[in-house]
Image: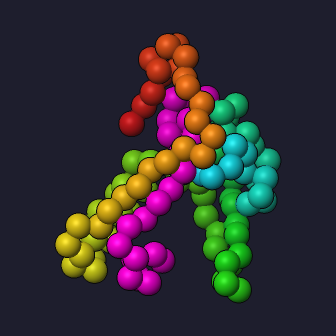
Amino acid sequence: NGVKLGYDYLETDVKMTKDGYFVCSHDDDTKRLGGTKTIAESTLEELKSETLSQTRGGVKYTGQICSVNEYLTICREAERLWSLNGLLVLITTTRPTYPSSSQLSRVRT
């Protein structure tokens, strides 16, 4: 939606799942979106099993949690579809957590 509205950049927050994937989420859990999972305690597959929803500006959006790889693919596709010349992508952490060495060894793309 940001691309359609003419934004120059898209921003997302990321969290790491129990099995080492990075997902796009501002929150540590999925409860605000109607889910029941805590991101750090769930695998990507478990998180993907939930249908999440949010209403913004009177429009209801429904879907699953997005991995960072999926997010970047969406950004690249949006750039191509709308003939953008350099869409900026900002990935942030809201409450940084530093993974242990054992967690880092599980990071997946």
Image-quadrant location for residue 7: bottom left
What is the image's colouring? rainbow
User: Which residue: 61% across, 64% down?
Assistant: 63
User: Which residue: 50% across, 13% down?
Assistant: 101
Q: Quadrant of the C terminus?
A: top left
Question: In the image shown, does 65 or 8 lie closer to the viewer?
Answer: 8
**In the visual, does 78 lie left or right of 53?**
left
The answer to whether residue 49 shows anywhere in this view is: no
**In the visual, does 16 lie left or right of 107?**
right
Question: In the image shown, does 83 or 91 lie closer to the viewer?
Answer: 91
Question: In the image shown, does 107 or 9 lie closer to the viewer?
Answer: 9
Instruction: Based on the picture, tell me whether residue 14 belongs to the magenta stretch.
Output: yes
Image-quadrant location for residue 53: bottom right
Instruction: Based on the picture, tell me whether residue 51 belongs to the magenta stretch.
Output: no
Residue 57 x/y as whole percent = 67, 84
User: Which residue: 77% across, 58% down?
Assistant: 32
Question: In the image shown, does 12 or 20 lie closer to the viewer?
Answer: 12
Residue 61 x/y as whole percent = 64, 74
Residue 43 x/y as whole percent = 61, 34
- Seen in the picture, residue 28 relative to 5 is either above or below; the reply is above
- Seen in the picture, residue 90 relative to 58 is either above or below; the reply is above
The answer to whether residue 86 shows anywhere in this view is: yes
- Seen in the picture, residue 9 relative to 109 is either above or below; the reply is below
Image-quadrant location for residue 39: top right
Residue 21 x/y as whole percent = 50, 35
- Seen in the picture, residue 79 relative to 35 is either above or below; the reply is below
**In the visual, does 79 lie left or right of 29?**
left
User: Which residue: 52% across, 13% down?
Assistant: 102
Give the extent of the magenta segment. 1-24
